[in-house]
């Protein structure tokens, strides 16, 4: 899988260690890692001959490979994706994306976040939105349309990022996963005014972290097995409509999921 991202030396080392541990090539592990990066660390759509061709993985959901009855291959893909997903948001695996040189007081030439935040534990992008997460400071920086906003993550230990479709603006569009469940960016307090990349920073220094807070009552934090199965059914129906799943594959997976209800 082609990716514009470059792995750090630490990322390359982890890829090799995981490949050796699971008995696959480093190229196969890179393919899954790049797919996870595009899926915010929780979803991966990939294509690699060693992994059975086209496939898909979702954290807490299903694992699909081209050789759909190869349970051993499914288990290998699931194990690799789970391992990569667990370290995706806690370790820096990719070299930060480069931006324009007009960055003023930014942390480095290839970094877009304010210098005083230091080095993030993870960075990524969802469509046209970039994010950089600083767990030790309880901060997350969001870059959209050339403007940066800083948010206080409070008691959340962010583990995954997604972006809702067909929503305009930043508020509510980004969805985060933490030990407390899933919540929108609008649930986090903004610590800086909306400003362009390169403008002087104007947000307060990080204070002592407050105690963990409960997620606003926007929904269940942990879906029941039945709800999870129904969501997976909806997902495979979408894949079938898009031609990713054949009629036979769709019927087989549908029957398997319905048997769980």
Image (cartoon, grey):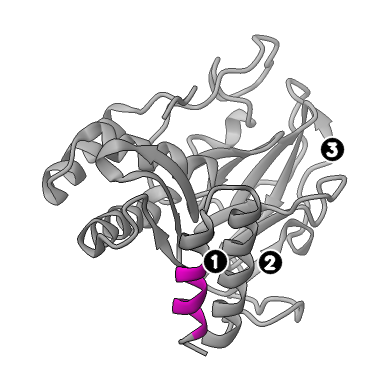
Q: Is residue 24 magenta?
A: no
Measure the C-alpha gap from mark 2 to mark 1: 8 Å
Q: Which residue is mark 3?
A: 194
Measure the C-alpha gap from mark 3 to mark 1: 25 Å
Report the side of 19 relative to 186 (left or right): left
Q: Residues within 10 Å of mark 1 (few under 14, many from 20)?
A: some
Q: Position of residue 12 (x, y in %)?
A: 26, 31
Dot 3 or dot 1, earlier in sequence? 1
Furthest toward the right, the residue is 168
User: Residue at point 62% right, 63% down?
Assistant: 237
Q: Which mark is residue 178?
A: 1
Residue 10 makes an appearance in the image: no
Foreground mark, 3 or 1, reads 1
Q: Main secondary structure of the magenta part?
A: helix
Dot 2 or dot 3, earlier in sequence? 2
Q: Is residue 23 above or below residue 177?
A: above
Q: Is residue 111 above or below residue 128?
A: above
User: Residue at point 48% right, 41% down?
Assistant: 37
Viewer-side residue, 68 vs 64: 68
Q: Position of residue 63 (x, y in %)?
A: 39, 61
User: Residue at point 66% right, 12% down?
Assistant: 100
Q: How many labels were placed on the picture?
A: 3
Occupied quadrant, residue 71: bottom left
Q: Residues within 10 Å of mark 3 (few under 14, many from 20)?
A: few
Occupied quadrant, residue 230: bottom right
Q: Position of residue 143 (x, y in %)?
A: 71, 35
Q: Give the SS element for disc 2.
A: strand
Q: Which residues are magenta?
A: 251-258
Q: Give the SS element for disc 3.
A: loop
Q: Which mark is residue 183?
A: 2
Q: Which image quarter holds the N terminus?
A: top left
- The reply to whether discs 2 and 1 touch (Cβ–Cβ < 8 Å) is yes
């Amino acid at each position: 899988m082609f990716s514009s991202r470059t792995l750090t030396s630490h990322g390359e080392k982890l890829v090799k260690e995981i490949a050796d541990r699971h008995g696959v090539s480093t190229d196969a592990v890179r393919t899954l890692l790049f797919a996870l990066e595009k899926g915010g660390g929780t979803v991966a759509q990939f294509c690699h001959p060693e992994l059975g061709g086209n496939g898909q993985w979702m954290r807490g959901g299903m694992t699909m490979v081209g050789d759909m009855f190869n349970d051993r291959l499914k288990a290998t893909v699931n194990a690799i994706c789970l391992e990569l997903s667990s370290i995706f948001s806690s370790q820096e695996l990719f070299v930060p994306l480069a931006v324009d040189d007009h960055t003023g007081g930014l942390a480095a030439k290839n970094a877009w976040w304010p210098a005083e935040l230091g080095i993030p534990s993870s960075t990524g992008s969802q469509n046209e939105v970039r994010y950089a997460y600083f767990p030790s400071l309880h901060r997350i920086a969001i870059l959209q349309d050339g403007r940066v906003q800083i948010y206080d993550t409070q008691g959340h230990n962010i583990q995954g990022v997604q972006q809702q479709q067909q929503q305009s603006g930043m508020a509510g569009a980004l969805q985060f996963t933490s030990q407390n469940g899933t919540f929108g960016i609008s649930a986090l307090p903004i610590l800086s005014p909306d400003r362009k990349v390169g403008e002087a920073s104007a947000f307060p220094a990080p204070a002592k972290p407050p105690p963990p807070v409960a997620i606003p009552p926007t929904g269940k934090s942990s879906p029941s097995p039945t709800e999870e199965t129904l969501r997976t059914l909806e997902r495979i129906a979408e894949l079938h409509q898009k031609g990713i799943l054949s009629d036979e594959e769709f019927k087989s997976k549908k029957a398997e999921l319905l048997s769980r209800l």
